[in-house]
Structures are given as structure tokens and as C-alpha cells.
Image: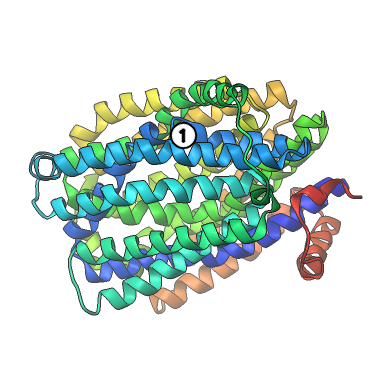
Amino acid sequence: MGKHAKKIIKESFIMFLIYSLTYPMGYLLRLIFAKNLSVEDFGLFYSVMAFVNFFIIFRDFGLSECLMTYLPKYKVENRPDKIKGSILFVLSFQFIIAVIIASFLIFMSGFLSVNFFKTKKATLVLVVFAIMFIINGFVEVLNLSLIGLGKPRFKAISDFFHSLIMLISSFFIFLFMSGTIAPTISYTITRVFLVIVLVFFFLSTFRFFKYRAYLDKKMIKEFITYSLKLLIGTGASIILTSFIVNMLTFYGGVEQVGIYGVAFPTASLLALFSKSVSLIMSPYSSEQWTKGRKDKIKEIIEISYSYLIIIVIPFLFILFSYSDLIIGLIFGKQFLVMTTQIFGYTITLASISLKILLFAVLFSMFNSMNMSVIAAIRKPFEVTKTVYVGAIVNFLFSILLIPKFGIIGASISYVFSVLSLIIVSLYYIKKFIGARFPYKKWLKGFFAGIIFLIAMSLSKNYININVYLEAILITSFSGLIYLGMIFILGLIKISEVKYILNVGMKMFKNKNFKIEDLDSE
């Protein structure tokens, strides 16, 4: 394991710790919403959010993603004036387009509430989200700029404070208000505060703001050309994430969106393990590609492929086995009321949706890393092709399944769309980076996971105590078996574990570590 890989592991540890705090807060936020809102209002809030987010493609035009690619390039060239100019250009462009779109949504809010959301309660929420659509453009540009400037740790901190402020404000607002207006006001307060903090942070931290912004026709042309290549892919990505919810809103109603709104984030808890790595890979890959060091990118990808699957598998099967217990305990039994019959067995819609979505999230973790690298090495057409394949698959399966099967059809549609994404992105990673895929390790990891699942199933037959204590004992016992299996199968070595633990204990000694310091040794 080279020094570059060790440095990346160290930074990933820090990012993982930050998101280890951020994700639970986001989950707790949904818990507060679920406890204070009806299933219908819970679903309505997230339905409106998904609908407004569908218009991000027109506000962004792929320009924000350009910042993650070109800011590292300008850093290598030592052009702080270009960094400032490009950020201001993207901010200005987004603001103008966002105002136009927000005005349209506000004008159409009454019509959409009655004919799409099928409830007049959506009108006020839609108006507020339309206004926030403008502010969110600033948050997005500044956050992606942090990644492009080699500060993914600060982007993670920004996400942390977003979750924290939203959590605190929601708690107090629900003491005085009820219904969908309460989380809407909380969301507004949080985003406005975040913009103020981010602007202050940029002005006080980055020296390029001292320089006069430089922006010429060549840069504008370069940005627009690159963004147009990404635009189709960005649009397809939004279709992938928002289209399913919008379809489910129309055909299944906001109640099913509410159930989907607890199943999806529960499954997405698995993404905690990959998010920190993906954020680091983008600026790192861009810098190393600019310097012609493809081998360094290859090394990091192969390490991530190998270890991520080992870490995630047991958590996936725990969520799979205790889906009803987890949703009922955390969100409340009202989300387990709706059921369906599968092979003669009565299963809650929330449980079956969560079980299906877990595998979609597993695929998406690897895909997010792949897409970060492909975009960072300046292959926008490949990003476009990859995401468009997923969007087409998503569109076809959604049209085919959601009108008939509702939330189950939505969950299956998402699995197939993400699976198509990972197949294509793996092809491009192999083509451009030459990374070898550890298929044998993946198969061994799944085999160890199956043993883990069997151990849990058999243990349930012999342990009959309080359901929560039973879950803790069974998962602990099965976890020890899984740990033994990964050592027996040679998936991880004792020396590697010692190194990782050593990094975890010492990582805070070098508090000034930055991504750009990777080449210092």
C-alpha cells in the first residue's frame, strides 16, 4: 500500500467520522417529521421537494459540476484569479435561471396542487420551495467549489451543520406548529443560514478572493462546452432520482411517497461508508490526472473496491433481516399499516421496499465512486452516456411497474436503473484507468454475508427473549462469525487491520492535512 493510498485512507477516516454524525442526524430529522406528521403530510413534504428538485437541470446546466473539474486544474496552474472568476460566473448564471423557474412554479402552484399533488395543502409548501430553489443554487455552487478546491472535509462539515440546524429548528418549530408548514419553515431557516455561513467562510478562508476575477471568452466557452456535455447526463441523473417519486406521487398518492420516504433513507444509511471516499476521489483524481499519474488513481480505486464490500455486507443483511422492526421502532407503526400479499405471505409495503432498495444502494455506492473519477478525469461524454443508460432503464421500468405495483414497482425500477449504471461505469473505469475489479473478493464477500445471514436465521430459532435484546445478541454473534469468515477467506490481513487502526488513532495529530499535501512525501 503506497503513501498516496495511506494518505487517502487517513482523510477518508476523518470524512467517515463527520458523516457518522451527519447521517444519524438526518435520520433523526426524518424521525421527528414522522412522529409529528401524518403519513400523508410526511409524503406531501417530500413529494413537493422531489418535484421542485426536478427543475435543477434547468437551473444548473451542468455548470456546477464543471467547478469540481476545473478548479483543481486552476490550482495546479496557480491561477487564483481564474478560480474566483469561474465561481462568480456559475453563481450569476444559476441565480438568473433560478429566478425565472421559481416565478413559474409560484404562478402555477394552485393548479399543480389540485391536479398533480391532489391536495390544496401543497400550495404554500410549493411556493416556499420555489423561493428556496433560488437559495439552494448558492449552496450547491459553494459546496461543489469546496470539493474542487480540495476541501472535501469542509463540504462534509457543511453537510453536518445543515443536518444539525435543521434538526434543532424542526424540534422547536414543531412545538408551536403542525402540518407540512413546520418542516417547510425549518428547511427555509436552515438553507438561509447555511448560505450566510458559506459566504463568510469563503471570504475569510480562500486567498483567491483578494485577486481580481479573471473570466475571458475562452474560459466561458470552455465551461459552457463542458457543461453542455454534462447537461444531458445531469438531466438524466435528476430523472433517476426525482422521476420515480413524481410518478409515485401521481399513481400511488402521497401516502405511498411517505412510506418510500422512510424506506429509502433507511437503505441509504449504507452509503455512509462510500460518501467520504467519493468526495475525496473527485479532487484527488482530477489533480493526479492533470499530473499524468493514472497509476495513483488506479491504486485508490482498487483498494476502495476491495474493502468497501467487506464493510457493507453485514450491515446490509442486518437491515434486510430486521426491516419491519427498524422502521416500526424508529418511525412508528403507522408506516407499517399498508401491506401486500407475496407468495401467500402478508408483508408490509415499507418492509419489502426497504429490502429491495438495499441492493440498489449497494450498487450505487460503487457507482458514485466511479462517476466521481470519470467526471474528474474530464470525460463528460462518458458521464452522460452512463447516466443516460440508467435514466432510460429507470423511465421504462417506472412506466411499466409503478402504475400497477406502486411503491414496490418504484423500488424495483430504482434497482434496475442503478444496476445498469454500475455496469456501464465499471466499463469506463477499466477502459480509462485500467483498474482491476476484485470479482473474487466480491464473491467471497457475498459468500461470507450469506453465512452471516444463515447464522442470524438459525439463531432466531434458539433465542426467544425481548425482540430488541434478541436482535442485539443475534447480530453480535453472527457478526463474530462474519469476522472470522473474512479472515479465513483471506479478504483482509492482520497487518492491514493494524495499519488502519494505527491511522485511526493518529490521524488527528496532523490537523493541517490537505488533499494537496498528498505529494509532499
Does residue 419 lie above or below 333 as drawn?
above
* Place of residue 399 in the rendered image (x, y in percent of width and height, measured from the top left): 25, 27
Q: Tell me: residue 372, above or below residue 328.
A: above
At 39% from the left edge and 60% from the top edge, which residue is drawn?
Answer: 192
Q: Which of the 4 image quarters holds residue 78?
A: top right
Q: Position of residue 403 (x, y in %)?
A: 19, 33
Q: Nearer the viewer, residue 120 or 402?
A: 120
Q: Amino acid at mark 1?
A: Val
Q: Residues within 10 Å of mark 1 (few under 14, many from 20)?
A: many
Give the colouring mode of the picture: rainbow
Q: Secondary structure at mark 1?
A: helix
Question: In x, y percent, where is residue 307?
Answer: 69, 48
The residue lying at 54 percent from left, 50 percent from top is: 143
Image-based side of 115 in relation to 391, left or right: left
The residue identified by callout 1 is: 418
Residue 348 in view, yes or no: no
Choose between 419 and 183: the one closer to the eye. Answer: 183
The answer to whether residue 378 is seen in the rendering is yes
| Rendered residue at 38%/51% (across/down) | 135
Where's residue 494, x and y in %? Answer: 83, 59
- Decide if residue 411 is on the left or right side of residue 296: left
Taking depth in this image into account, of 202 and 215 the one nearest to the observer is: 215
Q: Is 180 on the left or on the right of 494, as rendered?
A: left
Q: Nearer the viewer, residue 505 or 444?
A: 505
Residue 172 is left or right of residue 465, and the answer is left
